[in-house]
Image (cartoon, rainbow, N blue to C red):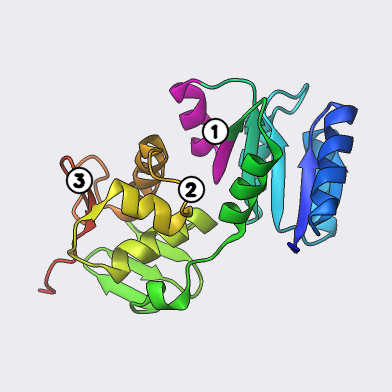
Amino acid sequence: MSSGRILVVDDEPQIRRVLRAALSMQGYEVDDASCGDEALDKLRAAHVDLVLLDVNMPEMGGLETCRAIRACSEVAVIMLTVRNTEADTIEALDSGADDYVTKPFSMPELLARIRAALRRLPNSEEGGPEVLKRGEIEINFATRRVMSRGGSSRLTPKEFDLLRYLVANTNVPISHQRLLQAVWGPDYGDEVEYLRVFINQLRKKIEPDPSHPRYILTEPWIGYRFALPDET
């Protein structure tokens, strides 16, 4: 049986009831909220491991709610939506979501996505230093903070997992598929747009000039590489 506390956020009572029943049967502790404001109140009041968040809600929509969650919490977030274009996916991930599931979905698929969002990289894969300081950047893996260009940024859970894996394999080109399966799980491999979004977010937080990256480099036709220049 699974474990963890999940908050279901959807304005449709029937969807909340169905998800609550199905997730409870899998061993999850489940709460629900009918709108973004209620979800934020519940996140402040009690520990939550994962949020299932509907995109299309009245008043405070899912994207706005996700951004508000990210401003105060590192909880895993999976967006649920009927929209399935690449632009919609990118918009959801840009707002801070860890994953994106299109309605209608099967329960086995959703459960797999939940397990992937809740998983952490095993210690053997993490490796690397707790603090990495080089040139204009300082990455503190213990606090998940990045110092760059005189400012401080906090990494979201998936940003942290992705950067940790890249740094643990410094100067080694890593394929899209390997990155996806290492960070999101074995059911992933073709969601290259996920990587593009998360790599762009990391570059904004790390690179002195995100449009001309020095550290997180693109390996054409392969994937990405974390380049660590020699100290001068």
In three-dimensional space, the C-alpha distance between marks 3 and 2, rounded to whole angstroms, equals 19 Å
In three-dimensional space, the C-alpha distance between marks 2 and 1, rounded to whole angstroms, equals 20 Å
Mark 1, Cα crowd under 10 Å, few <14 / some 14-19 / many 20+, is many
Name which of mark 2 and mark 1 comes first in the sequence. Answer: 1
Q: Which residue is mark 3?
A: 222
Mark 3, Cα crowd under 10 Å, few <14 / some 14-19 / many 20+, is few
Relative to 221, is 55 above or below? above
Picture coordinates of residue 133 (x, y %)?
29, 73
Q: Amino acid at mark 1?
A: Ala
- Which numbered marker is on residue 92? 1
Residue 90, magenta (yes or no) = yes
- Which numbered marker is on residue 155? none
Residue 183, magenta (yes or no) = no
Q: Amino acid at mark 3?
A: Ile
Whether residue 175 sits left or right of residue 165 in the image: it is left
Name which of mark 1 and mark 3 comes first in the sequence. Answer: 1
- Which numbered marker is on residue 187? 2
Asked if marks 1 and 3 touch (Cβ < 8 Å), the reply is no
Q: Secondary structure at mark 1?
A: helix
**Residue name at image x 54 percent, y 22 percent:** 84
Residue range in magenta is 85-100
In which image quadrant can residue 141 be found? bottom left
* The one of 163 and 150 positioned closer to us in this rendering: 163
**Residue name at image x 85 percent, y 44 percent:** 20
Q: Which image quarter holds the N terminus?
A: bottom right
Q: Amino acid at mark 2?
A: Asp
Whether residue 112 sits left or right of residue 190 in the image: it is right
Residue 214 visible (yes or no): yes
Residue 71 visible (yes or no): no
